[in-house]
Image: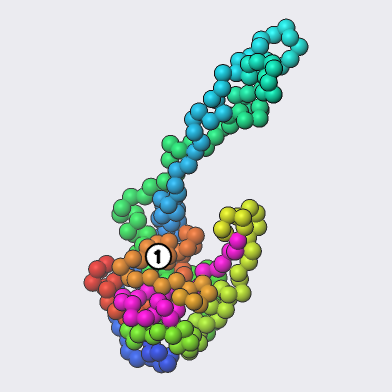
């Protein structure tokens, strides 16, 4: 990946403040296969086992009457002088019967990944955020942005108002991607609308901080924007859906943390 050795640190007014040497993690080889595996492992780890009771639909003394009566040989509830007498039971095709192939709680949903592979995937996802080609390929609006990675001074973490963060985004050319995320909100097709997932929302910029002095409150209301502490960085936040190259805003202290902890 074509990434410069020096990174530009911007001030809150969009002017260049200084240049810093990028940590070696930003030059990690691009491995989309490992990134995909790491994201799938994170998603499947959140799946809660579910299934039906093993005795559901089978709590009955129904028996088949056998042949020679001119009726189907399905198990039937015993008796004849009550409403349920001779009614089919137990089998999947009967009302109140068992399921044919029910979901089983012992099914293993988790797709595991080796520790070293997961770590390499995280490093590769971090490096992908500094590649303009990958960021554009992922669908972000970056026409107004010239240099990657995007690094801001630590003063950015002191902002407490949404209007202040909007002003910074406009000066850096990031605001167009926030508008893209806002206009891309769609109503989901299918039954997910009935299950608390009515809308599908595009992912916008990711803000990586080292300390929260008000920035989370200031930026959380912008559509598509996520804020994460550098300690909690994970492959899924850097490559949602397994697609690397998310538009990421770093603060200078977060870059310094990467240089110390992930060298």
| Front-lying residue, 65 or 129 | 65
Across and down, in percent, residue 186 comes to 63, 66
Quadrant housing residue 160: bottom left
Q: Is residue 167 above or below residue 237?
A: below
Quadrant of the image containing the N terminus: bottom left
Residue at the far top: name it.
Answer: 68
Quadrant of the image containing the C terminus: bottom left
Across and down, in percent, residue 16 comes to 38, 91
Residue placed at 41% from the left, 50% from the top? Answer: 45
Horizontal arrangement in the rendering, residue 57 relative to residue 11 (left or right):
right
Quadrant housing residue 153: bottom left
Q: Which residue is mark 1?
A: 125
Residue 226 in view here: yes
Q: Is residue 90 magenta?
A: no
Horizontal arrangement in the rendering, residue 162 relative to residue 159 (left or right):
right
Q: Is residue 209 magenta?
A: yes
Q: Is residue 53 above or below residue 133?
A: above
Residue placed at 23% from the left, 72% from the top? Answer: 260
Across and down, in percent, residue 95 comes to 66, 30
Residue placed at 46% from the left, 70% from the top? Answer: 246
Find the magenta span and give its range. Answer: 198-219
Residue 30 in view here: no
| Front-lying residue, 226 or 68 | 68
Number of numbered discs = 1
Residue at the far left: name it.
Answer: 260
Q: How is the image coloured?
A: rainbow
Quadrant housing residue 197: bottom right
Element type where label 1 sits in the image: helix
Residue at the far front: name it.
Answer: 81
């Amino acid at each position: 990946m074509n990434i410069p050795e020096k990174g530009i640190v911007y001030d809150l007014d969009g002017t260049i403040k200084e240049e810093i040497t990028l940590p070696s993690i930003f030059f990690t080889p691009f491995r989309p296969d490992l990134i995909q595996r790491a994201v799938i492992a994170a998603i499947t780890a959140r799946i809660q086992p579910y299934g039906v009771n093993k005795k559901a639909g089978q709590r009955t003394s129904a028996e088949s009457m056998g042949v020679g009566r001119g009726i189907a040989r399905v198990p039937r509830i015993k008796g004849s002088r009550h409403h349920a007498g001779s009614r089919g039971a137990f089998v999947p095709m009967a009302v109140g019967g068992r399921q044919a192939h029910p979901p089983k709680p012992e099914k293993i949903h988790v797709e595991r990944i080796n520790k070293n592979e997961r770590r390499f995937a995280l490093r590769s996802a971090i490096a992908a955020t500094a590649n303009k080609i990958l960021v554009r390929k992922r669908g972000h609006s970056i026409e107004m942005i010239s240099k990657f990675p995007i690094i801001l001074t630590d003063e950015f973490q002191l902002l407490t108002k949404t209007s202040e963060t909007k002003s910074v985004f406009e000066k850096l050319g990031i605001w167009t991607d926030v508008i893209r995320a806002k206009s891309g909100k769609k109503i989901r097709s299918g039954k997910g609308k009935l299950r608390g997932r009515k809308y599908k929302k595009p992912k916008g910029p990711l803000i990586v901080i080292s300390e929260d002095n008000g920035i989370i409150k200031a930026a959380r209301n912008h559509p598509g924007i996520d804020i994460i502490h550098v300690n909690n960085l994970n492959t899924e936040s850097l490559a949602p859906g397994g697609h690397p190259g998310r538009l990421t805003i770093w603060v200078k202290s977060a870059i310094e943390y990467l240089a110390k902890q992930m060298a």
